[in-house]
Amino acid sequence: MIKEFRLPDLGEGLTESEILSWKVAVGDTVTLNQVIAEVETAKAVVELPSPFAGVITALHEEPGTIVEVGKPIVSFEVADDGGGSPSGVAPAGVAPAGATNAVAGAAKREPNLVGYGAVVESSGRPVRLARTFTTAVVEPARGSVVEPVKTVPAETQPAETDTAERPRSTPPVRKLAKDLGVELAAVAGTGAGGLITREDVRNFVGGEPSAPVRHLSAVSDSVSAAGPGAQGGREVRTPIRGVRKFTAAAMVASAFTAPHATEFLTVDVTPTMDLLAKLKTSRAFSGYKLTPLTLVAKAVLIALRRNPSLNSRWEEASQEIVQFNYVNLGIAAATPRGLTVPNIKDADTLSLLELSEALTGLTEIARAGKTAPADLSGGTISITNIGVFGIDAGTPILNPGEAAILAMGAVRRMPWEFQDEVALRQVMTLSLSFDHRLVDGEQGSRFLADVGAILAEPGMVLTMV
């Protein structure tokens, strides 16, 4: 029997995801929980496990397409065991064989994948609304040569009626077609079920149009060269989606919601760097990756004990200030897909060795784009290490829902006053941004001073704990 697997809600309330790659092909035999695809949500790249054991009969979406939650993405041929799925219940979003839409909507089904649970009210494909196409004119680039418009005899042109069906495509493809001045109705889709892909649109612009021909205007070479992804073009357009889209929205919301204040402190961290060198040669830390970030993170966790207001959240809806008795320490990580801020749960309970191990694992997973959505939410305070890029200071934007973020700058050898003389010392600048609704200037200053004192003289920890 044929089973459809619909794109699940991955537990973050997201409405769509992008298919990055398929790990299987039509005709492949898969086992239960075998990874069949990688999808990108607004927060992270997630591997999708197979909910069935069987043979792949169809892949409904191509890599690069954005799919709404609840839409079928792959079909399986599975053995009919008389009870549907191995657990005896139908997969979420898939109506039992022969069931009507009313029955499917009313049936109570248990999810077979974490976060996969929305009951689909209709088992059929969504009905597409009628759309009438109107002719538009593409303005040629200044100085370009415009070729005569290609026409087709009236008897070969498809009749344009008010009931013309909207061409099957995805939002990014429609945006690309709009940018290039291409009418999608003129493009023949080569994707599954006649779906129009990016390559179909680009081939239409760069080569001979596919029948039926209804090219609105011949596009000159100069326009074609400027298209997305064109080699040597003057512009490159990249759709805003996935992690980049989510980060942009979050940063805008934070910048225009929380009143930011930023303070700076330059510290002689020579004793901390000496301690770091000793720890690296210590047998206890053999095999562990220790960096300045490790010790700065530990200093932040210790300073928070004396300054708990920086480990809190402002809740506008309930008009409450929530102070956390735990620390989920966020670490800003630059990844090929954009900035992410995964956090270490209950970081305040970890030893320095455990913190080092957690930081190493967190950054490696983040840079590989494998961070789980759960690790990107629930942070209480964050650190961003701009020093790795050779930057001394900045004004970091708060991670939404957090009261503070600390930016650590580069460690530089500089002339510095030391024991009444000028000497070359290792110096770092710390930048602290905080939500002024939650943190007063005095509280922010005391916290920053505590972090600086620990880094200037690690032995100060004994006076703080």
Image: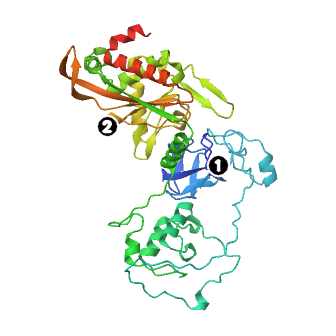
Q: Nearer the viewer, mark 2 or mark 1?
A: 2
Find residue 287 and report its horizontal and vertical position in percent: 31, 23
Residue at (38, 83) in percent of width and height = 145
Q: Residues within 10 Å of mark 1 (few under 14, many from 20)?
A: some
Q: Sequence-wise, which precedes: disc 2 or disc 1?
A: 1
Find residue 192 and report its horizontal and vertical position in percent: 56, 64
Residue at (38, 36) in percent of width and height = 394
Residue 272 occupies which quadrant of the picture?
Answer: top left
Q: Is residue 36 above or below residue 138?
A: above
Amino acid marked by disc 2: Ile
Decide which of 259, 101 is in the foreground and name it: 259
Left or right: 14, with 251 as reference point: right
What residue does disc 1 label?
A: 79
Quarter of the rendering occupied by the C terminus? top left
What residue does disc 2 label?
A: 391
Decide which of 425, 128 is in the foreground and name it: 425
Find residue 4 and report its horizontal and vertical position in percent: 64, 53
Find residue 337 and report its horizontal and vertical position in percent: 43, 47
Q: The residue tagged with tag 2: helix, strand or loop?
A: loop
Q: CA distance from mark 2 to mark 1?
A: 60 Å
Q: Residues within 10 Å of mark 2 (few under 14, many from 20)?
A: some
Left or right: 291, with 43 as reference point: left
Decide which of 141, 356 is in the foreground and name it: 141
Amino acid marked by disc 1: Ala
- Does the rendering let one see residue 34? no
Q: The residue tagged with tag 1: helix, strand or loop?
A: loop
Residue at (49, 25) in percent of width and height = 441
Q: Is residue 169 above or below residue 152?
A: above
Residue at (64, 49) in percent of width and height = 79
Q: Is residue 286 above or below residue 13?
A: above
Q: How does the figure colour the protein chain or chains?
A: rainbow
